[in-house]
């Protein structure tokens, strides 16, 4: 008797979770189904959630893949995101290591400032940053994105990696110094290898940030070929007289693929990194 | 002595790139923003910036468009933050009670979080279009309304769509964070509560909530910042229309800077937002420290 009550209880949990899930993924499915419909059908009435089996087509995807500029946009996004991730990982790990391990002049000041900038929305700095980009002559260039993205993700990355550094026993550092190792030896041979999971989780987050960034890239880049994917997707609006939703969502689906690959293959690090900051308190 | 000196040089080397990038691309713009907010600076006075004290701040604070945008951001935060937290916690508690498929549910509920804002906004814009799927469903399938609703043509219609999107996109993050917190709650706390005759609801309020208080406050701080950060979704879905009634503080700041060229005004506005968020974060962090002492 008791077991069946428990089974019913479990059944209800699965039912609620599945219903919730359907609601949550509904918009994603609709995006995919719209991308698979013939472009003309999008303006037909009535709108349908699923396309008819026989009208499913890849023509929207084929159109996107035929346009050379979208290939460019894709490469731009890959380039900007990877370079941002690589620079941010090294730079933030070095800062996190120094802040966690050494007392130097301005240490507290530096850390307070890092924490403070985590509170301020990045977009509030868009005017002075734009001015800076004009002065540096990086408007309409990918080099106008990368340093700003790196600066943007440094506070969070440093803060997170610092937590991982603090979990490494100091004795390891000291043993290396006694063996005649330098600060560099400790950083490259002890800290970097041992904080790898932390750096990995931060890097996934940074990749996502750079990959989907919209306001800054939309402000700095005007040239079709220099655009990153989010700007390319939003570029469908206003360009045509009416919006080609099939193309919009085909490009959207394609731009989600790298994120899905990164997320599913690195899921473990991702969850670890997200929760590291929250449960400590 | 020599080793100490070379150690300091190495520390300097490690710190330098970070400090340079952070200083040049973040700190310098913050300082510049602060200075700009005290000058008259717009398209008309590009090369002739005049110090005008607090005039920009006064203009922002007395501007009815700013009041509208500010109240939109407040409402957005007040609604989306609790909505995400409650739904995220609920799903986390449900997943915490099952073994089979737990990972699959987690991954699937997290999908909206990793979907970019641009894409998610466009899907919602498409669904809530006047000729879109939702209106068709409401009028022709379940006959709830007789005519199409113009979701995106009114202040609260547009804001509701943005808030729905914000909540939809945020549930997964809350679920993951709360799930991690729930797994740290000791089982015997529940067992001894059960011995005292506590039911599920009593257990929730007297065991679960106090045990994850730190995480609740952490989420509160992060989501409040996120709520005031809302930009891309509103820009894509309504672009502030109709008549700037659906602007958030950041889309309004952007409009003033890049469409009307009032840089001084938007600098003052940015600074006001930064200060408001700073104060809110300090208050919430204080609450967090306080809860640790309990």
Image (tube, rainbow, N blue to C red):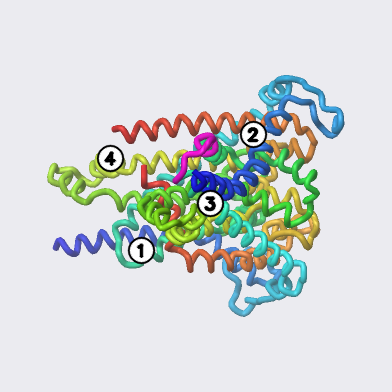
Q: In the image, is residue A80 part of the stretch drawn in magenta?
A: no
Label 3 crowding class (10 Å Cα cut-off): few <14, some 14-19, many 20+?
many
Residue B231 in view, yes or no? no
Residues indicated by labels 4 and 1 sit on the same polypeptide chain: yes
Q: Which mark is residue B140?
A: none
Q: CA distance from mark 4 to mark 3?
A: 43 Å
- Give the left or right position of residue A280, taking residue A64 as reference: left
Instruction: Specify the subunit that label 2 lies on.
Output: B
Q: Which residue bears the numbered disc 1?
A: B102
**Can residue B243 be seen in this snapshot?**
yes
Q: Nearer the viewer, mark 3 or mark 2?
A: 3
Which range of residues does the magenta coloring cover? A101-111
Query: In percent of the image, x 67 and y 51: which residue is there?
Result: A147
Label 4 – label 1 distance at C-alpha = 24 Å
Q: Nearer the viewer, residue B53 or A163?
A: A163
Q: Quadrant of the C terminus of chain B?
A: top left
Eye-nearest disc, 1 or 2: 1
- Residue B66 location (% of width, % of height): 67, 30
Within the image, what quadrant is residue A190 found in? bottom left
Q: Could you give the CA–CA distance between mark 1 and mark 2, rounded to whole angstroms? A: 41 Å
In the picture, the disc for residue A94 is: 3
């Amino acid at each position: 008797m008791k077991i069946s009550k428990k089974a019913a209880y479990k059944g209800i949990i699965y039912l609620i979770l599945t219903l919730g899930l359907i609601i949550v993924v509904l918009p994603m499915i609709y995006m995919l189904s719209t991308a698979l419909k013939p472009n003309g059908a999008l303006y037909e009435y009535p709108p349908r959630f699923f396309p008819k089996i026989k009208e499913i087509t890849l023509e929207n995807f084929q159109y996107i893949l035929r346009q050379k500029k979208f290939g460019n946009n894709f490469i731009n996004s890959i380039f900007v995101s990877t370079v941002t991730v690589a620079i941010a990982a090294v730079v933030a790990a070095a800062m996190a290591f120094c802040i966690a391990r050494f007392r130097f002049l301005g240490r507290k000041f530096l850390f307070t400032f890092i924490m403070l900038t985590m509170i301020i929305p990045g977009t509030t700095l868009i005017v002075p940053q734009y001015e800076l980009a004009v002065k540096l002559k990086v408007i309409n260039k990918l080099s106008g994105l990368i340093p700003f993205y790196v600066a943007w993700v440094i506070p969070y990355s440093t803060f997170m990696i610092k937590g991982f550094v603090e979990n490494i026993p100091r004795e390891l550092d000291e043993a290396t110094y006694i063996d005649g190792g330098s600060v560099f030896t400790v950083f490259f041979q002890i800290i970097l290898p041992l904080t790898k999971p932390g750096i990995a989780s931060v890097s996934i987050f940074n990749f996502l940030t750079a990959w989907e960034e919209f306001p800054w890239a939309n402000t700095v880049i005007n040239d079709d070929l220099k655009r990153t994917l989010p700007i390319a997707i939003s570029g469908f609006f206003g360009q045509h007289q009416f919006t080609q939703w099939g193309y919009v969502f085909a490009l959207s689906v394609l731009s989600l693929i790298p994120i899905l690959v990164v997320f599913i293959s690195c899921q473990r690090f991702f969850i670890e990194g997200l929760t590291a900051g929250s449960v400590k308190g | 002595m020599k080793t100490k000196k070379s150690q300091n040089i190495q520390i300097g080397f490690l710190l330098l790139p970070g400090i340079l990038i952070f200083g040049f691309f973040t700190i310098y713009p913050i300082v510049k923003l602060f200075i700009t907010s005290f000058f008259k600076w717009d398209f008309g006075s590009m090369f002739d910036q005049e110090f005008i004290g607090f005039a920009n701040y006064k203009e922002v604070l007395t501007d009815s468009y700013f009041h509208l945008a500010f109240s939109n951001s407040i409402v957005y935060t007040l609604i989306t933050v609790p909505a995400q937290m409650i739904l995220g916690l609920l799903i986390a508690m449900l997943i915490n009670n099952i073994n089979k498929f737990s990972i699959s549910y987690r991954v699937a509920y997290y999908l909206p979080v990793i979907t970019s804002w641009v894409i998610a906004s466009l899907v919602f814009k498409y669904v809530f279009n006047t000729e879109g799927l939702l209106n068709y469903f409401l009028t022709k399938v379940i006959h709830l309304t007789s005519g199409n609703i113009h979701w995106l043509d009114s202040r609260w219609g547009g804001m509701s769509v943005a808030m729905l999107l914000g909540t939809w996109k945020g549930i997964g993050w809350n679920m993951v964070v709360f799930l991690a917190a729930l797994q740290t709650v000791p089982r015997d706390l529940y067992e001894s509560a059960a011995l005292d005759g506590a039911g599920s609801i009593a257990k929730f309020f007297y065991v679960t909530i106090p045990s994850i208080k730190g995480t609740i406050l952490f989420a509160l701080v992060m989501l409040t910042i996120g709520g005031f950060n809302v930009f891309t979704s509103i820009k894509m879905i309504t672009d502030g229309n109709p008549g700037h009634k659906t602007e958030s503080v950041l889309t309004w700041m952007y409009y003033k800077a890049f469409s009307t060229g009032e840089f001084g005004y938007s600098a003052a506005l940015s600074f006001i937002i930064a200060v408001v968020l700073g104060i809110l974060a300090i208050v919430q962090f204080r609450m967090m420290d306080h809860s640790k002492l309990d």
